[in-house]
Image (cartoon, rainbow, N blue to C red):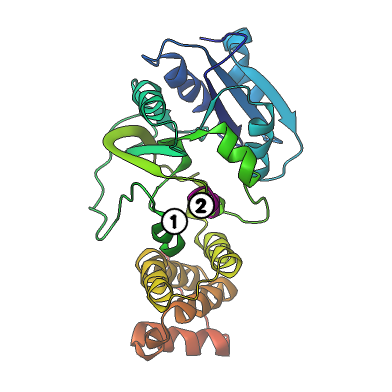
């Protein structure tokens, strides 16, 4: 699949998922797209044997190592080395669907003005088996001129759903490495100023759900979410209102769950932090008993009673 003049560069930032990485790489090699494709794996100071996971693929994969700088840094490193006309990001534990690159490249070639093409994602577990998830209510799939839509929120679940024109990435300067968890959303806001996006309802990515998902760190993710809002303020009251609603829909329940779980294990500091973020999203939560009662106990330093062991 590789060649001197690749059409597509697939960038895989790698950290802590060596057990999944071979399957991730193989999903690129198994593409129906038969034109030149390069695969760049960026080992972001991974603590596991990323090199060993990549070695069996030989010169079909380019492995680059760097000190740990975070996912945005690893993605930017891969982009800086990319030679393809188009760049496809792929997290090191996810899988492309077999025809993903083929139909996305076709869409880009059909409309040279497109900046980004994306499709749907579905969910799989650690053994590649399908995972059922509840439908995402009010979840948009913006297409065309969608800058306003992306000011409101991120409507692409994970970067692996996308194919991006490399010239557009160069124009906006890649990912903001200071933002964790929402660096992809922030990039889409800037890319959507460069030109239109195109959405196709076909599944482009199998997103792996497992305990090691980076997206599981809800506190860091919320901070990153707020950084994006601060970086891209809006004078439009409707946009600000929709942003708040979008943030509540994604974070509020998860933050309350985290606060409850942290309190049960005796981590009062984390429980309080999650409660603070939840109240920032929606001040009305302070009047709920499930918020104010544990909040008071947390502030007083009163830990939950431990059940006696049998």
Instruction: Residue 163: name its quadrant.
Output: top left
Give the residue displayed 43% in from the left and 37% down from the top: 114
Is residue 305 visible to the viewer in this orientation of the structure?
A: no
Residue 292 in view of the camera: yes
Identify the secondary structure beneath mark 1. helix
Which quarter of the image is occupied by the C terminus?
A: bottom left
Q: Which residues are the magenta region?
A: 186-192
- Residue situated in front as seen by the camera: 248 or 171: 171
Neighbour tally class for label 2: few under 14, some 14-19, many 20 plus, Cα within 10 Å: some
- Asked if residue 147 lies in the magenta stretch, the reply is no
Give the image location of residue 270, x and y in percent: 56, 71
Measured in 3D between alpha carbons, the distance from the residue under mark 2 to the one under mark 1, in whole angstroms, is 6 Å
Question: In the image, is 112 to the left or to the right of 78?
Answer: left
How many discs mark residues in the rendered view? 2
In the displayed structure, would residue 269 be above or below residue 90? below
Task: Name which of mark 2 and mark 1 comes first in the sequence.
Answer: 1
Tag 1: Cα neighbours inside 10 Å, few (<14), some, or many (≥20)? many
Residue 298's label in the rendered image is none
Residue shown at 38% from the left, 71% from the top: 248
Residue of label 2: 193
Residue at image point 36% right, 23% down: 106
| Residue 190 inside the magenta-drawn segment | yes
Q: Quadrant of residue 17?
A: top right
Q: List the residue tagged with mark 1.
A: 147
Q: Nearer the viewer, residue 254 or 241?
A: 241
- Give yes or no for contact between labels 2 and 1 (Cβ–Cβ under 8 Å): yes
At x 67% / y 50%, what residue is drawn?
177
Measured as percent of width and height from the top left, residue 130 is found at 27, 35
- Residue 10 lies, in percent from the top left, at 54, 26
Magenta segment main secondary structure: helix
**296 shown above or below 60:** below
């Amino acid at each position: 699949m590789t060649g001197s003049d690749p059409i597509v560069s697939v960038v895989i930032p790698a950290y802590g998922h060596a057990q999944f990485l071979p399957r991730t790489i193989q999903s690129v090699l198994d593409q129906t797209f038969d034109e030149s494709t390069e695969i760049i794996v960026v080992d972001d100071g991974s603590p596991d044997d990323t090199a060993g996971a990549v070695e069996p693929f030989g010169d079909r994969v380019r492995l680059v190592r760097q000190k740990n700088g975070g996912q945005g840094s690893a993605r930017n490193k891969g982009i800086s080395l990319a030679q393809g006309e188009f760049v496809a990001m792929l997290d090191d534990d996810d899988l492309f669907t077999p025809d993903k690159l083929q139909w996305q490249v076709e869409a880009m070639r059909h409309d040279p003005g497109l900046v980004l093409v994306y499709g749907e994602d579905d969910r799989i577990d650690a053994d590649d088996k399908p995972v059922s998830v509840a439908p995402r209510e009010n979840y948009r799939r913006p297409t065309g001129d969608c800058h306003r839509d992306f000011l409101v929120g991120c409507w692409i679940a994970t970067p692996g759903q996308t194919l991006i024109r490399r010239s557009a990435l160069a124009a906006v300067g890649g990912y903001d490495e200071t933002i964790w968890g929402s660096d992809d959303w922030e990039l889409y806001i800037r890319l959507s100023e460069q030109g239109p996006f195109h959405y196709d309802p076909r599944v482009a990515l199998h997103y792996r759900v497992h305990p090691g998902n980076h997206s599981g760190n809800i506190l860091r993710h919320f901070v990153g979410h707020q950084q994006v809002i601060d970086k891209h303020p809006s004078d439009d009251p409707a946009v600000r209102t929709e942003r708040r609603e979008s943030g509540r829909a994604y974070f509020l329940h998860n933050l309350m769950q985290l606060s409850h779980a942290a309190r049960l294990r005796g981590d009062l500091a984390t429980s309080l932090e999650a409660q603070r973020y939840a109240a920032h999203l929606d001040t009305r939560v302070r009047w709920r008993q499930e918020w104010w009662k544990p909040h008071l106990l947390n502030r007083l330093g009163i830990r939950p009673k431990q059940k006696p062991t049998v």
